[in-house]
Amino acid sequence: MQLNTVLLISGGLTQALQLLAALSLLILLHEFGHFFFARLFKTRVEKFYLFFDFLFPFSGLLNFSIFKKKVGDTEYGIGWFPLGGYVKISGMVDESMDKEQMSLPPQPWEYRSKKAWQRLFIMLGGIIMNVIVAMVIYAIMFAGWGEEYLPTQNARYGIMADSTAQSIGLQNGDKIVAVDGKPVARFNRIVPEIIFNEARTVQVERNGQAVTVPIPEGTIRKIIKSKRASFIQPRVPAVVEDIVKASEAEKMGLKANDSIIAANGQPVMFYDEFEQIKKASAGQPIAVTVMRHDTTLVLNGTVPKEKLLGFAFKSPDAFFKYDKIKYGVVAAIGKGFSYTFDQFGNYWRQFKMIFTSKEIKASESLGGIVSFGKLFSPVFDWHDFLALTAFVSIILAFMNLLPIPGLDGGYVIFLIYEMITRRKVSEKVMERATTVGLVLLLGLMLYANGLDIFRLFKK
């Protein structure tokens, strides 16, 4: 088995384990939110399950658990179907579709016997918990790591533009001044500003001159389909950081901290300039001129057909001044609170674009469990893992808030209707709506995961 295949499998396993850990934690906490408010209002909880102990959404099929233990009135367990979890609350129409219980007279400990505002809190409990979890994680991150970013004005060498960026008229070395005439203080916010606001122009400084670059229709779709992070990056000098052992770069004699000043006789100052020459030399000899401790050396080698010499250049933080904000405990809590709602708003804008933007296609934007897994880094890092776990918690809160029967938001709509009209929705209507909602959710789940499978075979 080749080394790159081993690394791919190892990275994929790391991503899968992170996904499993994050989702398991978030599902447990979401269901605990429902459980907490149910018990607070003296409502009996019959089951508390991580994953489903049936073939979702068919509550009567393949009913078995990996683990279960009854404590008091509640059976705690782990189901075999690993896509979600649930709490079965007495006297409630839910994914268990227990119609027999609903045919009996209401009991004092049942959900249907509680006041509407109490039932509302029970239904919102999972969403509230997901939001709180995101706040806590972000607060921990801000307290522990602070906040670090590259001010746009500090990217003094301008940008590196990928093929999509160059196709609209951006050039390597352009210094971003504004998006649609509005300055963007942080470099990593430039691309999100272009996407979320469907920007039509980018203002740059090019060779000392102000230039407005129009963004043609279809560009945002191209950015989203490709890797967003590669659209523009801070332009950096061609200075070597690491060498891969037994690589062509090591055979050539390249060393860490070498500054590349030419390749095949062409002057080189920046990373993108070297990459362009290297790609054009695939399968051919290459002569790399480097500056090492005030000495100029010419190193000879051959560019492999896959265009990888086996070394990495230094990242932007080696050349530019990053701003870092440190937070005390109280400030971190406040920042965690505000950042959570900022992220919630960002996700709402992304979600809305699927239905309102001409640039976005659902078939290209939606994804299932594979897409979720790819969000995680193939190399474990606590900061990245926590940041993504917090964001996934926000996604779960948002998705559960959607007014679809079978999701928390669907039940909330019925409860709000009841609180306004003072008329309770009949159990029959609830059962039928929940059935339709669960079938719809199953369809969406199959569609999203089907897209993932299609993309894998398409590659």
Image (cartoon, rainbow, N blue to C red):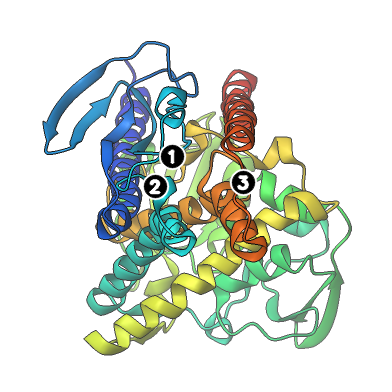
Residue at point 57%, 31% (across, down): 431
Residue 427 appears anywhere in the view? yes
Rendered image: mark on residue 92: 1
Residue 428 in the image, given as x and y percentages of width and height: 61, 32
Quadrant the N terminus occupies: top left
Of 267 and 87, nearer the camera is 87
Q: Residues under labels 2 and 1: Cα distance?
A: 6 Å
Relative height, residue 38 to residue 60 (above, below) = below
* Image coords of residue 106 (percent x, y): 40, 40
Nearer-the-camera pick, 118 or 365: 118
- The outermost residue toward the top is 62
Where disc 1 sits, the SS reads loop
Q: Viewed as shown, does residue 198 lie left or right of 272?
A: right
Find the distance from the CA under tag 1 to the CA under tag 3. Answer: 12 Å
Tag shown at residue 111: 2
Q: What residue does disc 3 label?
A: 425
Q: Which is more toward the observer, 346 or 283?
A: 346
Instruction: Decide which of 151, 453 is in the foreground and name it.
Output: 453
Residue 266 occupies quadrant: bottom right
The type of residue carrying mark 2 is Tyr
